[in-house]
Image (cartoon, rainbow, N blue to C red):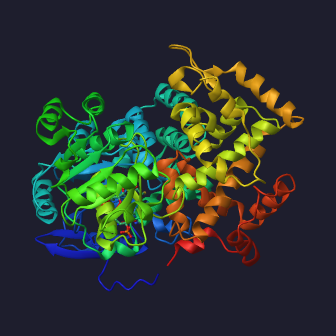
Amino acid sequence: MMNIRSAPAVRYEMVDGTALIAIDNPPVNASSHDVRTALLEAVRQAEADEAVDAIAIFGAGRTFIAGADIREFGKPPKDPILPDVNNAIEACAKPVIAILHGTALGGGFEVALAAHARIALPGTQVGLPEVTLGVLPGAGGTQRAPRLIGIAKALEIITEGRRIGAEEALEMGLIDRIAEGEPRDVALEMAEEVRQGNLGTRRTGELQVSPDDAAIADVSERLKAKQAHLFSPHKAVEAVAGCTGPLAEGLAQERALFRQCIESPQRAGLIHAFFAERAVAKIPEAGATPRPVAGAGVIGGGTMGSGIATAMLLAGLNVTLVERDEEALARGRASVEGNLAQAVKRGKLDEAKRAAILAERLKATTDLGALAEADLIVEAVFEDLEVKTELFARLDAIAREGAVLATNTSYLDVDRIAAATSRPQDVVGLHFFSPAHVMKLIEVVVGDKTAAEVVATGFALAKRLRKIAVRAGVCDGFIGNRILAHYRKSVDYLMMDGATPQQIDPALTGFGFAMGPFAVSDLAGLDIGWATRKRHAAMRPAEERYIPIADRICEEGWFGRKTGKGFYVYPQGGKPEPNPEVARIIDEERAKAGILPRNFEDDEIVDRYMTAMIAEAARVLEDGIAQRPIDIDAVFLFGYGFPRFRGGPLHYADTLGAKELVARIERYAEEDAHYWQVPPLLARMAREGTRFADMNEG
Ligand code: COA
């Protein structure tokens, strides 16, 4: 994109001997090439100007520098690079102070660390979150932070990447003072404090740091145990470990390690995930005005309904929970209460607020008529088209004009549900993921007739619930479950042909998934998949290979965790073990089908699983169910435990290339031509040499 900004990225002003350097690079004052160039120039100008005796750097607008410009990562670095700018700030012969507000993160906080004193406005958050983007603080952070707060604390904040509030930062010694006011006023005031000798200044890089081998060993052990698959946290520890020698050497080593991180595929994956989280909000309906929502109705108090009600209550909405009888209602209410109690336990809610929510904002009733005034109603009843259409017909008669009528169906046809009402424009799918008060994703399923404001209302609601909404079209399973229904079969085929669940699960967690597919099935309840398979049996094409193993497990009454047995056995308080009976069932089914089991390497398992996922994702894209590849990536990152450092299935697909994927599918198709078909989109991409990423642009 062309840079059409005519305003300077940095403004320079002289007031009574103070050089005021304001970073002005909306929206977040990222330290882009323009900013670095102008900041360096401004510091040099102030240093050379005899009339200047103090220099203050602050942010214009809503924040100090919120970070390096992430969009520049992966492109060739352009001088001046941030480490050089920071070294010039630190070396400056005149006192340089940084006034922080908003979020001073990453490269932004490193600028502050190079200043000679740091003053934060109340509410400021600071931190070095680089590892969450697959890099490490590469502009002096790994050298200067330990000089201020010691190696142990520095390792903690750098490897966790968490944000630190002003008070805690002050206590730690990361900043020197908290002051109230507008950043420019505080800058002038603090410059005066420096002049008066009331605010001490010093060069961070000149401070002594005591070695702490124990802390380094501790963190290394912890990372090896918990984040062995991640690249940059380990490199960050290495960089911090080098801080006890001369600054220049430590900085040079930090730079080299930073470059390694920049080159790593994990950096590309994590940054893709960062942008995916934001890109999904760019929808055709973005210009429409969302309808105001103060009071919501939730129909159904099961796991989904009570989770949705909890999420809404936590976000400040009034909720009316409706169930069909008193018994179910009591269960639903108890489950919301349990969720809220959990939130208190996890420190997300205080006791007084919990009590107030239950007393004032949750209403539970068996009377559907109580939803007459609701602004938005989410239906989360039994997954059956007839049940849902009947309910929507009743809602049509009850809900006020303009109320948004949402269904939480995970597979069913939203258009048919909408057609049961006289106002299909008000009907939308809001597909939450279980547990709904925890999982981040909502698929906003847009029907043929859904009005733009209704779509916008779904997105606004998601934002309010601090969730990530992704726009999806109508089809069986929308984006996520349609793709899941397809690739889930690939592991059943692998199991039938020779791999075991206890080999497949670790192969996929080894790839980075939060859980393996068989452990997931056991957790979700095997009866759920069983019911779906029975429902779909009549529609199953004759050529489709069908693996009856899971059905046989269900026939034994083993539904996974909730019955203590499924693919695994779950001993009370003990670790899950493979269910030996499953091995017997697998053997029997193989024998019946005349299959001689063969050996699968872990890589092959991952390849088949991922190829199946990507193939169906390509079809979902081609069918227009998802707008862009990045929407599919977001669905899997935020709803399906896809490893964030791999960026999402289609980002990962680009690392393989369409040619390789087509070749794989053609190879697998020799065994099963019905399941393994090359999606036309992928074939075209292979011919043209294009990538999914190309479709995200524009
Ligand atoms: N570089 C480039 N662009 C950035 C950016 C960065 N460091 N940080 C944010 N942006 C962009 C976002 O992509 C978004 O762009 P869009 O409007 O085109 O989608 C825009 O700035 C606003 O960001 P958003 O996250 O939507 O705003 P927010 O107010 O919710 O949050 C921040 C602001 C700064 C807290 C958040 O953007 C953030 O955490 N950024 C990353 C900070 C970071 O990790 N810095 C360390 C890098 S070394």
Q: Nearer the viewer, residue 288 or 58?
A: 288
Q: Name the side, left or right, on which 321 lies relative to 684.
A: left
Q: Position of residue 290 (x, y in %)?
A: 25, 67
Q: Is residue 84 above or below residue 198?
A: below
Q: Nearer the viewer, residue 367 or 70?
A: 367
Residue sitting at 10 percent across and 71 percent down? 16
Q: Position of residue 50 (x, y in %)?
A: 21, 73
On the rendering, which quadrant does ligand 1 occupy? bottom left
Q: Position of residue 386 (x, y in %)?
A: 43, 52
Residue sitting at 36 percent across and 62 percent down? 420
Q: Is residue 118 above or below residue 528?
A: below
Q: Nearer the viewer, residue 67 or 413?
A: 413
Number of numbered discs visible in the structure rendering: 0
Q: Name the side, left or right, on which 409 lies relative to 329.
A: right
Q: Name the side, left or right, on which 319 lies relative to 638.
A: left
Q: Does the rendering let one see residue 189?
A: yes
Q: Position of residue 145 (x, y in %)?
A: 38, 44
Q: Nearer the viewer, residue 586 or 459?
A: 586
Q: Does the rendering let one see residue 100?
A: no
Residue sitting at 86 percent across and 34 percent down? 597
